[in-house]
Image: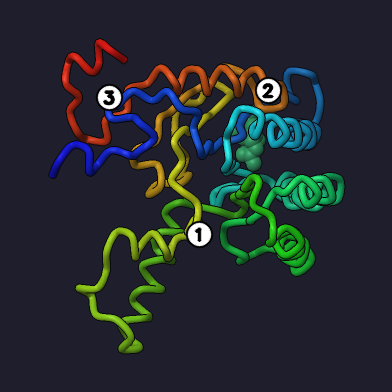
Amino acid sequence: MAVQENTPSKGEASGVAEAAPLHVAIVMDGNGRWAKRRGLPRSLGHRAGADTLKRIVEAAPKLNIRWLTVFGFSTENWSRPAAEVAELMALPKRYFETDLARLEREGVRVRVIGSTQGLSRDLIKICREAEARTAGNDAFFLNVAFNYGGKADIVEAARRFAEEVAAGRAVPGDLTEAGFESLLATAGSPPPDLIVRPSGEQRLSNFMLWEAAYAEFVFQDVLWPDYSADHLKAAVAEFQTRNRRYGAVVPDDALAAG
Ligand code: IPE
Ligand code: MG
């Protein structure tokens, strides 16, 4: 396979990423520690985290980011104490109540990705409404991963393809990477170029497992409630120093030039 074929366009033949990341995904982490340091209940950390999300959704388009995917609640977060789960379940409502009108007005298309299993009818309705009200927008794309797990999403995609086969609408040999991607919750979004995790933790925690194949990772030592537009800017700047090769090789002279 030729090097060019496997390398995205945008004049990046040198493999040096100079452009802004088109799609940034963030593992919003550190709400609990932020609250603990202040002697506050964890719930207040989560509320402060929701305020950060507002700021970051406003800051991202100014950095030429077009897709933002945030991890709000993982399929593993159900194992937290019931009161904390309840607090986390209340966040989308709080967030959309205060911010949906602005998102709608500013051309942001919202998608809530993840399983609806275990979510209240009210919450599902709020999420579907946010999607419906912004369905015609295309200035910026916000994916909120809620009750999302990368493994669960891959299994769900596999199940859906198996159902197609069982129904006689497909045969196993039909399956391609692109076809499989179209069955994932993130279908329609490009893969994330940059995955950011604040709070000092350095792991993916079951976030976008498939989609992360060629993402760059930036870990930042700041708790999510303290995360600012400047932190996002720094993460983007770090991304822009990276040399993305997508498994190919880059000639030495191109690297020197970059
Ligand atoms: C992120 O903050 C919120 C969710 C994972 C839902 P945490 O609640 O994980 O905060 P820490 O990691 O305990 O500080
Ligand atoms: Mg955490």
Left or right, residue 185 beside residue 213: right
Q: Secondary structure at mark 2?
A: helix
Specify how the rendered protein is coloured: rainbow
Q: Position of residue 34 (x, y in %)?
A: 71, 23
Left or right, residue 65 beside residue 58: left
Q: Nearer the viewer, residue 186 or 202?
A: 186
Q: What crowding class fits label 1: few (fewer than 14 Cα within 10 Å), some (14-19), or many (20 or more)? A: many
Q: Secondary structure at mark 3?
A: loop
Q: CA distance from mark 3 to mark 1?
A: 32 Å
Q: Nearer the viewer, residue 153 or 168?
A: 168
* The furthest residue to the top: 256
Q: Secondary structure at mark 1?
A: loop
Find disc 1 in the rendering and name its residue.
185
Mark 3 and mark 1 residues within 8 Å of each other at the beta carbon: no
In which quadrant is the N terminus drawn?
A: top left
Q: CA distance from mark 3 to mark 2?
A: 29 Å
Q: Nearer the viewer, residue 214 or 67?
A: 67
Q: Residue at x 46, y 41 (%)?
A: 192
Mark 2 and mark 1 residues within 8 Å of each other at the beta carbon: no
Find disc 2 in the rendering and name its residue.
229
Q: Position of residue 145 (x, y in %)?
A: 59, 50
Three-letter amino acid code of the residue under disc 2: Ala
| Disc sitting over residue 14 in the figure | 3
Three-letter amino acid code of the residue under disc 1: Ala
Q: Earlier in the sequence, mark 2 or mark 1?
A: 1
Does the beta carbon of the residue at mark 2 sit less than 8 Å from ligand 1?
no
